[in-house]
Image (cartoon, grey):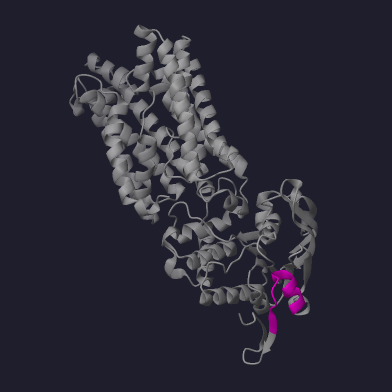
Amino acid sequence: MKNNAYRQHFILLSILLIAFFFFSLSNGRYSNNPMDVVGVVWNKLIGKPQDNSVMETIIFHIRLPRITASILVGAMLSLSGAVYQGVFRNPLVSPDLLGVSAGASVGAAASILLGYGMLERQMLAFSGGLLAVWITTRIPKAFKNNSNMMLVLSGIIVGGFLCSLLGIMKFIAEEQTELSSIVFWQMGSMSNISKNELISISPVFILCSIALILLSWRINILSFGEIESKTLGINIKRIRGIVIICASLLTASAVSISGTIGWIGLIIPHLGRLTVGTDHTKLLPITLLMGSLFMLVIDTAARALTSVEIPLSILTGLIGAPIYGYLLFKQKANIL
Amino acid sequence: MKIDISKLSYSYNGKKDVFRNVSFSMHAGEIISIIGPNGIGKTTLLNCIMKLITPTSGEIWIEGKDMMSMSYQEVAQAISFVPQSIIPSFDYSVLEYVVTGCAPRLGVFERPKEKHYALAKDAIEQMEITHLIHKPYTKLSGGELQLVSIARAITQQAKIILMDEPTSHLDYGNQIKVLRLIKKMVNKGYGIILTTHNPDHALLLQGKVAAFDRNGDFHFGECNQILNEDLLHLIYGIPLHLLRDEEVNRVVCVAPNL
């Protein structure tokens, strides 16, 4: 992949993302004229009093946090997906498959049951996610079998166990309040994300994304496997550790604010590879942009298409599964 | 550049010895062919010298430095490794793959620049595979992959190159081509240690021979001094003949009639 083609894709995706940002800002149940939206944003920027205060509230207190959340969550899930696939040299893994999402879900559900606040929920989701990915990656080592298939099977074992834990929590949850919030949260939604939540996950997003993009060339080498990495002088334990922790923190923070949203961490990296190739120095920035755009489009559809909110996991599954099928069909030579 | 190996032994779980008491030295510009029967520990020895596994006892010194005290990065600056086979993961282009040979000389956050790509392109040219430069390395044949792997070792700019059975996946023509290439690299000043199942390869390459016989005993010396019919019998357990052929003007190793 030539550098020029990469640059073109990068710029095109950035423009699309900005355009869709404004489109999304001006669409919803209380639909607005895009020009009026630009006016409101402009007035806000230059500090002029607003002529339309209802619209201001909708734009700045309802839509903007939600759009920001979609962009962040989309970026985090797809970036971590691309990184996991690279490090585990396995195009079949995703945050869901490694059990990170399930682990974070169990942590978050536990905090709902315990009546904890937002901060504790994030901490528990983090710990749950990290613990899950640690166990998933230990099982193949314990069996002394480092194949792709073993890792996938290990993810199924851990995910299945965590799903049952989540089931127990739902079973003992109080029906009216706790259960509904666990279930709602499990299907994924951007609707109740507060500014504070966004502020609390932004440092994680910024630090981990920067670290991963800085390390992206090393991720190429990690994707050659343990022996080749060592012979190329990589301190594999340290670099791989940092990379996995960053990716897991990204997933866990995304899950802690939006709930579990499937598919995106699996298909967007594939789509990225189809566009700019496998070199992670190009793949990671492209994947990040694509994930943001995809999530923003999905969430805008979820809130603006019908009069009721459609849970995000339903939409990502409906759209993601066929896309993944198509991608596998196109890449069939490169799997396994 | 000099490597000293002294009284090296390796055993799995401290039980059965894979090899024991191996000592030899090598300089850049020398070639050592490691020969021996299946499963005797040829690859294990290479893995020890690359610091991929830790020997049970004994020492390896690189330029007078104890390898155990060196980081992977320091080892990779001195020694590069061509594995018996590489299992491609994702479809990196040949150039993207070869340029990763620069990794030991780059900082953790650094990426290859123009001059590193130039090094990689030069190595690809030396291997005469320039036509493959933008091809995904998942789509290459075993022989092409071997050449790509050697190109990366050259890009690594280490003075010593270890090759684990560099001819094992190649047809006879390509085997000879690779051996010729290895000889050329030795003449350029690289030190090469390779393993092979074909004693005739050691004869073709000349230089030194490190041989494990079937009892696990280690023999080391100049090829034309120690490689004789008795040693070959000790190694392979069948009578093999060394004949001087006037037409090719060298000693060849042949098996008797079946």
User: Please, is residue B81 above or below residue B236 in the view?
Assistant: above
Residue B225 is left or right of residue A324, and the answer is right
**Which quadrant of the figure contains the N terminus of chain A?**
bottom left
Q: Hey, which quadrant is residue B46 in on the image?
A: bottom right
Q: Residue at x 46, y 9 (%)?
A: A115
User: Please, is residue B152 above or below residue A194 in the view?
Assistant: below
**Front-lying residue, A319 or B217:** B217
Which region of the structure is painted magenta?
Answer: B229-242
- The location of residue A25, given as percent across then percent down, is 26, 26
Q: Residue at x 42, y 25 (%)?
A: A255
Q: Residue at x 30, y 37 (%)?
A: A321
Q: In the image as oriented, which residue stretches furthest toward the bottom?
A: B246
- The location of residue B54, given as percent across then percent down, is 72, 49
Residue B61 visible within the image: yes
Residue B237 lies in the magenta-colored region: yes
- The location of residue A19, given as percent across then percent down, is 26, 36
Q: Residue at x 37, y 21 (%)?
A: A186
- The location of residue A230, given as percent across then percent down, is 62, 50
Q: In the image as oriented, which residue stretches furthest toward the front?
A: B258
Residue A118 visible within the image: no
Residue A254 is left or right of residue B38, and the answer is left
**Front-lying residue, A147 or A215:** A147
Residue A33 lies in the magenta-colored region: no
